[in-house]
Image: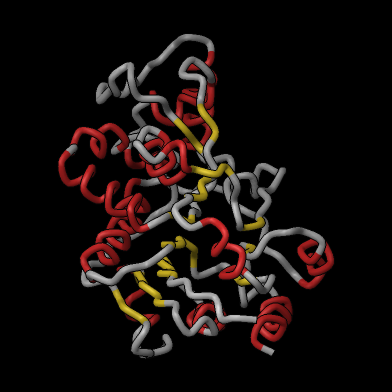
Amino acid sequence: MDKVDLRIAYILMVHKNPEQANMFIKQLLTDEQADLYLHIDKNSAGLMAGKLIEDPRIFRTSENVNVTWGDMSQVDAMAILLREVVRSGKKYDFICYRSGQDMMVRKGYKEYLSGYKGKNFFDAEEIDIDSEKAALFKVRYPKSTRKLYDTMHPYRILRMLLRKLYGMGINLLPNNSEFSSQIRLYTGATWFSISQELAEYMVDYLNRNSWFYNAFKESLAPDRMFFNTLAMNSPFAGRIINQPHTYEYWGSTYKTSNHPVIFTTGNINEIEKTDFYFARKFDISVDKNVIEYFMHKIIG
């Protein structure tokens, strides 16, 4: 079989567990044409110093931010990574956004993407602007409320109340940075695989349209809306395939519903039965064996 000629730039946000991140990086580097662009959380710079793999195909961002759950800082880090790829001057067929807590769980991703050159993969669901889900954007959330609270914290209760009220037609803290009526709002998983043309379009659009960024500044969990909305309102919308490539599922309890469940060895059969090429969330401090299982499956 002829070697597939396809250049991928993987862009990763890494904030913890350098040993685990290195395992994922090693998986990605098995593709000899792939490059990696890493954003290391500014809060974790000391923890990660000297512990991540060095390789000529790994590029670290020249700018780093403190990334917090549910906050615009997640979008900032994603934008930094996209700008770094575009600024590199290198040409890629796909730019794939993943996290440092992912693992590749199936071989053949490059071969799969080779059949979709010029296409873009986003998880994008249009939001009814009058629905409770739209409150993530239509309500203005004070910064102190945009944090991960796994308990019955008053700020989490406040968030729930604001969303419920919005769904009833009452907006106590309206987001005054509104879109024009031409813009449709989308939500979905953060992770994407896009063409360089779409990446360049998004970077250029954001450079010229500060209002779009400002509209999300006080929203909740903007990383699940920002780029999804930008892409689906772009000239590339007709080339977007609504299909995620990363397997994850969110908790159903009050404590776990704010983030994906961490996989253990008990989830291996479940993951193996899916058609996904990646999975998350893994945590080496919870279960190292499941990470090593998929590490050896891909690398051998």
Question: In the figure, 36 relative to 181: above or below?
Answer: below
Q: Which of the two residues, 147 or 15, is positioned nearer the viewer here?
A: 15
Q: Is residue 261 left or right of residue 135?
A: right
Question: In the figure, 45 relative to 275: above or below?
Answer: below
The percent position of residue 99, horizontal first and vertical second, equals: 49, 65
Residue farthest top in this picture: 169
The percent position of residue 50, horizontal first and vertical second, equals: 36, 90
What residue lies at 65% left-to-right and 55% top-to-bottom? 248
The percent position of residue 270, horizontal first and vertical second, equals: 81, 61
Tell me the quadrant of the picture where the N terminus can be found. bottom right
Residue farthest left in this picture: 208
Q: Is residue 88 left or right of residue 91?
A: left
Residue 281 in view of the camera: no
Q: Is residue 296 left or right of residue 241?
A: right
Tell me the quadrant of the picture where the C terminus can be found. bottom right
What residue lies at 41% left-to-right and 64% top-to-bottom? 93
Res. 49 image quadrant: bottom left
Res. 185 image quadrant: top left
Q: Which of the two residues, 35 or 254, is positioned nearer the viewer here?
A: 35
Q: How many marks?
A: 0
Q: Look at the image and name its color scheme.
A: secondary structure
What residue lies at 62% left-to-right and 77% top-to-bottom? 284
The percent position of residue 81, horizontal first and vertical second, equals: 32, 63
What residue lies at 50% left-to-right and 36% top-to-bottom? 187
Q: Is residue 206 left or right of residue 96?
A: left
Residue 278 in view of the camera: yes
